[in-house]
Image (tube, rainbow, N blue to C red):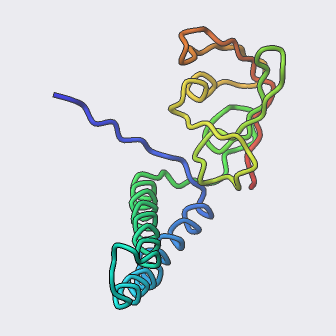
Amino acid sequence: MSETVVKTSYLTQEAFDRLKAELDELSGPGRADIVAKIEAAREEGDLKENGGYHAAREEQGKNEARIRQLTQLLDRAIIGETPPDDGIVEPGMLVTVEMFGDEETFLLGSREIADGSLTVYSEQSPIGSAVNGKKAGDETSYEAPNGKQIDVKILSAKPYTG
């Protein structure tokens, strides 16, 4: 018997609302627009050489995949306020660490919170689970995919305000 692992993600109310609006658009008007494009292309005739038809079908596949991704994310999301500015690492925090003698800053949480300019690690990732619950000054380590132990020193943890 295999166990199903349900991954939850921390989302701010703002991120949840933004993603819900995207889902509503994709599953309503967005879906209808794609169906209309497919029907219009189908009426053009031979589907084997109909670039518009194939492009619309590809767009439909991407749209449906994003709908599934958003539905799953929102169904499993933990919606919370911005975490307190207490220096303790938790989802929703911008964390600065020292690794390999260099500083690295990342967001602990869901990629959907950030605008794409930040590195994001989930709290279930090796580094995320190693630093979660720690505070500035703490040192920890985690096992990298190659089996090596990576030492990490937490320098700061501040709430991400996006």
Residue 31: give x, y in percent of width and height: 41, 79
Q: Residue at x 28, y 36 (%)?
A: 4
Q: Nearest the camera: 153 or 159?
A: 153
Q: Residue 41, relative to residue 71: is it above or below?
A: below
Displayed quadrant of residue 34: bottom left
As drawn, the residue found furthest toward the left would be 1
Give percent across and percent down for residue 110. 57, 46
Q: Position of residue 43 (x, y in %)?
A: 35, 91
Asked if residue 86 lies left or right of residue 50, the reply is right
Q: Decide: is 45 above or below 2.
A: below
Q: Residue furthest top?
A: 148
Indicate the quadrant where residue 69 lies. bottom left
What is the x, y in percent for residue 117?
75, 49
Q: Is residue 42 above or below residue 7?
A: below
Write down the quadrant of residue 75 in the picture.
Answer: bottom left
Q: Residue at x 74, y 40 (%)?
A: 94
Residue positioned 70% across, 52% down in the render: 116
Residue shown at 66% from the left, 46% from the top: 83
In the picture, measured across the screen, residue 135 lies left or right of residue 149, that is right
Quarter of the image with the C terminus is bottom right
Is 24 left or right of 11, judged from the image as shown?
Answer: left
On-image quarter of the N terminus? top left
Viewer-nearest residue: 92 or 86: 92
How many badges with numbers are in the image?
A: 0
